[in-house]
Image: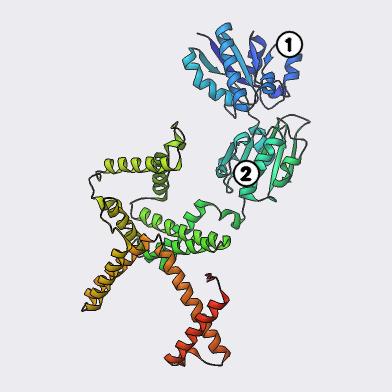
Amino acid sequence: MGRLTVIGLGAGALDALPLGAYRRLLSSSAVYLRTDRHPVVDDLRKEGVLFQSFDAIYDQADDFDEVYTRIVEELLAATAKYGDVLYAVPGHPAVAEKTVRLLRERIPSAGHELVFGPGQSFLDDLFLRIDVDPVEGVLLLDATDLAAHQLNPRQHTVLLQMYNPMIANEVKIALAEIYGDEYEVLLAQSVGVAGQERVQRVPVYQLDRLETIDHLTTLYVPPSADAHLLRRQFHELRAIVSRLRGPDGCPWDQEQTHLSLRRYAIEEAYEVVHAIEQEDTDALVDELGDLLLQVALHAEIGAEDGEFTMDDIIGHLSEKLIRRHPHVFTEQAVLTSDEVISNWQTIKAEERRRKGTEHATFMDRVSRALPPFAQSVKLQRRAAEVGFDFTDVVQIYAKVDEELREFADAIGIDEREDEFGDVLFSLLNLARFYEIDPESALKRANLKFRARFDHMERVASEKNLEIHGLSLDLLEKLWQNAKENMRKAGNTLTDNE
């Protein structure tokens, strides 16, 4: 069994190199550096330290993952060969060192011992230069693998390993998504290296235009006090809703329950659909926000009652999405759209089995939560799967006539409501036969009625007539006039409300 010792070279100055690290470098016979592009390396050469570096791998490999994997493989081979190897990394072994994380994973199976020696991170000097106490909360992120969702504009953020303009470009894109192009950040270079330190303030959009970016470049993103920026964060929405429901919040919001909010979820969903149909992006953003508010309110009420939290909602959804898309999140082969749907149904059936609902009735597959029209159509389609269906449209017309007669003969509000439901159900069968979407059809009828009535009102106004006081005969004439004029004009119905 060999021993691999990892030490840090510090921030760059020889007098800042820990004494223990310096002694190991002088006494070790097998010394490897992750890179010799470090300010202290020239001093080490002068001190007579002999070493090998892995810089050639950086030039040969296609990406950083390959670089780090090959370095670890060569270190393990060297440890097996020499028995005692010293591996020196820039800064501190535990700060932004992917090779160290990989060594921790690989060493046990290789049968070697992994030992850590001293090192000093440049972060100590960085916090002094930018006047930040890390106890306030600091995000340390890898610039080579940065995603916008990792950023929190309320916190001090330090981006390590911004090696070159290409990485700076990716960082710029991620920062701009959260902070905007003009937000000012601090570019810190060669921190801890006497005579070479440089800290400059630059806007985000300039990051990839700076020619001075190199392997000793770090980016500091200060926290923001911009209310508009902060309120774009999901956790801010949760805090706002919590305050609305709190002791000093809004009386209306405080009174709401899951039950009282039911109709708003439906109304907001319809508003979202309307914005989509109008192809109105601004309205869609607004209406999606209103729909999200309903989710946030239910989550807050659930948390207050000790039932569930927003994290439960998100976690449940995430797990379900992953479970129902094995072709995306596992090694399962890519499927066609039809195969995806079939697989989806199989997975849902397994979920029902685990819940103990696999023995539900045939019609229980149709959700009782669907709107009435959609539920009726699905019930009819479900029945048709077992052959319980009309064989031709003549039978459907006969059924419509039958239900209309029964409605006409009905007595009392309850019976009329019952028979009227049967009329609608039979008409939906007719729509299904002709492949008509009943929701779209009724919406077109609403648009048509609205447009004709608006035309009536406009014509009456042109004749100095008030529509509220007109006789039914005159209203009918205006209605027929509207129908004729709109027919001649060939107007396309649009909903601009």
Q: Earlier in the sequence, mark 2 or mark 1?
A: 1
Above or below: residue 10 compared with residue 451: above
Asked where in the image residue 259 lies, by quadrant, the reply is bottom left
The residue under the point 49% across, 81% down is 453
Circle 1: residue type: Gly
Q: Which mark is residue 446?
A: none
Q: CA distance from mark 2 to mark 1?
A: 44 Å
Instruction: Say if residue 341 shows up in the picture.
Output: yes
Viewer-nearest residue: 57 or 143: 57
Viewer-nearest residue: 88 or 111: 111
Element type at marker 2? Answer: helix
Question: Residue 109 in the image: x percent, y percent?
Answer: 47, 15
Viewer-nearest residue: 60 or 115: 60
Circle 2: residue type: Ala
Question: Residue 488 in the image: x percent, y percent?
Answer: 56, 78
Asked where in the image residue 294 lies, by quadrant, the reply is bottom left
Which residue is disc 2 drawn over?
174
Position of 129 with respect to 410 (left or right) is: right
Q: Nearer the viewer, mark 2 or mark 1?
A: 2
Q: How many marks?
A: 2
- How crowded pointer 1 is (Cα within 10 Å; few <14, some 14-19, many 20+) is rated as few
The residue under the point 53% across, 60% down is 284
The residue under the point 64% across, 8% down is 29
Which residue is disc 1 drawn over?
48
Above or below: residue 167 compared with residue 370: above
Question: Residue 359 in the image: x percent, y percent?
Answer: 22, 45
Question: Residue 418 in the image: x percent, y percent?
Answer: 24, 71
Instruction: Say if residue 117 shows up in the picture.
Output: no
